[in-house]
Each structure stands twice: as C-alpha cells, then as structure tokens.
Image: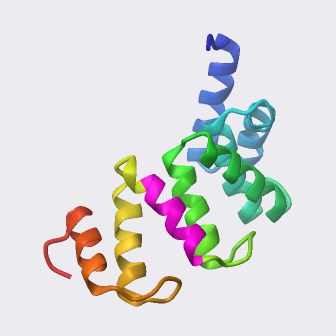
Amino acid sequence: MIRDEGLDMDLSSGIAAFESKHFSTATRFLAPLAEQGDPEAQYRMAIMAQNGLGMVENQALALRYMQAAAEAGLGLAQHGLGFMYMQGECVEQNGQQALEWFTRAAEQGLQGAMTTIGMMYRDGTVVERDEEKARAWLRKAGFDEF
C-alpha cells in the first residue's frame, strides 16, 4: 500500500500530540485516519475515547477502534483489547477472550502480554488457576523468580 505523505505527516503529528498529552490536537489529526482504517490511529483514538481524553468518554467507540486495530494485527491494540475483556471495560468481562488477545500480543513479543498471561494463570481470577502455565509464561516474559 502506497501511503500519502500528508497522511503520514498527520499520523506523526497526531502521535506526537498524543504522546505529549495534547489530546484535542491528537483527536483532530487521528480521527480521520482512524475512520480510514489506520491501526495506529485507531489504537490511540480508542485510548482517548475510553478515558475521555480530548473528547467525551465513549466506550462503544473505544471498543470499535481497539477491536479494529487488534484485528489488523497491532500488538499494542491486541494487548489493550485483552485488558478490556479482562477488566470488563467497554465490553462484558470474558477471561477466554482476554487470554486469546493477550496470547496474540505475546506471540508478537510483547513482554507485558506474557506477564499478564502468567499473572492470570497464577491468580486464577478470569481463567482457571494453573501454576505450571503461570511459571512458563512468567519465565517467557523474562522473570526468573516470582
């Protein structure tokens, strides 16, 4: 896919505004890109919509954007969607869905997702407790002792 340089500049400007907590500016740059299907823009718009940053809180929009970015393969969005399912934020709590999305993120090398899976198995809150799986995931995340 050939990207338009103007779109790349808008994405870069939107991400820079997001990172520096200028959420209204970030929304102005990222909302059109998110609607066009850009996963990086969708991920950041989801965070802003979920938390009411630069806009009125909108859980339905947050879920729609996070889901779209996750399905597009963005690891951070897969991790974020896993948290939504684990915590029951923007969506009904579902441990199996949480595990599925965290696993997809972990397969992309996200250490935080590996750690979360290990803790899920260790604590047994949204999935069945399994010490062996907990140790394996935490080891994979780089923890020697836990």
> On the rendered structure, is 91 left or right of 122?
right
Residue at x-position 55% and y-position 41%: 73
Residue at x-position 67% and y-position 52%: 66
Q: Residue 36 placed where, x, y %? A: 78, 30
Q: In this orientation, which residue lies closer to the viewer: 134 or 80?
A: 134
Q: Is residue 100 magenta?
A: yes
Q: Quadrant of the C terminus?
A: bottom left
Q: Residue 82 placed where, x, y %? A: 56, 65
Q: Is residue 11 magenta?
A: no
Would you place residue 2 above or below residue 12 in this image? above
Region rendered in magenta? 95-105
Answer yes or no: is residue 58 visible. no
Label the magenta part by its dominant secondary structure. Answer: helix
Residue at x-position 52% and y-position 63%: 100
Quarter holding residue 81 = bottom right
Q: Residue 27 placed where, x, y %? A: 76, 42
> On the rendered structure, is 72 left or right of 143?
right
Answer yes or no: is residue 55 visible. yes
Residue at x-position 59% and y-position 68%: 97
Q: Residue 132 placed where, x, y %? A: 25, 81
